[in-house]
Every structure is written in C-alpha cells, then in structure tokens.
Amino acid sequence: MLTDVRDIIIIIGISLSFVLLLASTILITSVFIKIRKLVRYIEESLEEITDLRKKIKNSIPKPISSILDGAVTVKTIIDKVFSKKKSNKKERDDKDGK
C-alpha cells in the first residue's frame, strides 16, 4: 500500500517535471524567435537608412554633401562630449547631495 502511493507520487513528479521542461522550452524558443525578428527589423531599417543617405549624398553636389557630413560629425562629437559632461555633473551632484 505504502509503496503504491510512493510510486504514484514519483510518477506524478516525473510527469510534472517533463511538462514544466516542455513549457519552459517552448517559452524560450518563442522569446528567441521574437528577438531574431526584432534584430532583422533593426538591420533592415539600418540598411534603408544607409541607402537613403547614399541617395541623398548622390543627389546633392559634392562640396555641399562634404559640408553636411562634416556638420553631422561635429554635432555627434559635441553631443557625446556634452552628454558625458552632463552625466559626470549629475553623478557629482548626486554624491554631494547624499
């Protein structure tokens, strides 16, 4: 009698562990599929942006496109420098305030 109950509990435990393993595998694969779709979408968007940038660059005369590229580069550098200074200032203010 006691061994029968023990055997039933063992069988139920093994069955539940397999069901949980199957469910977790399905969830993990669905997450990876969604991440892969998101990565593909981002890659396609980046390709479209670079294609559009090339078309604009080809349609604008060379000196003007060089000036625009330089301006974009300078703006990017300035944004990075000032964002670092602002973040450093915020960190210092947080340390002083606490």
Image (tube, rainbow, N blue to C red):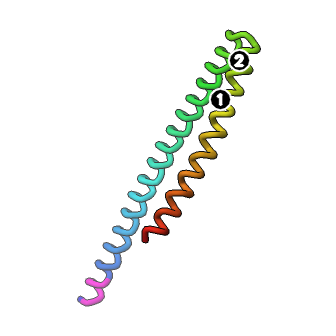
The numbered disc on residue 65 is 2
| The image quarter in which residue 69 lies | top right
* Residue at x 54%, y 54% (from the top left corner): 87
Q: For marks 2 and 1, give the CA distance.
A: 10 Å
User: For this view, does 50 lie left or right of residue 98?
Assistant: right
Q: Nearer the viewer, residue 84 or 10?
A: 84
Query: Which percent across, then down, holds residue 33?
Result: 49, 44
Q: Nearer the viewer, residue 86 or 21?
A: 86
Q: Against 23, is 30 above or below? A: above
| The image quarter in which residue 71 lies | top right
Q: Is residue 88 magenta?
A: no
* Amino acid tagged 1: Val
Please provide the residue range marked out in magenta: 2-6
Residue sitting farthest toward the left = 1
Q: Residues within 10 Å of mark 2 (few under 14, many from 20)?
A: some
Q: Nearer the viewer, residue 50 or 93?
A: 93
Q: Tag 1's secondary structure?
A: helix
User: For this view, does 64 lie left or right of residue 2?
Assistant: right
Q: Tag 2's secondary structure?
A: helix
Q: Residues within 10 Å of mark 1 (few under 14, many from 20)?
A: few
* Residue at x 68%, y 32% (from the top left corner): 73
User: For this view, does 11 lie left or right of residue 43?
Assistant: left
Q: Nearer the viewer, residue 61 or 26?
A: 61
* Residue at x 62%, y 27% (from the top left corner): 47
The numbered disc on residue 72 is 1
Q: Please state, as top left, top right, bottom left or bottom right, where the N terminus lies in the image.
A: bottom left
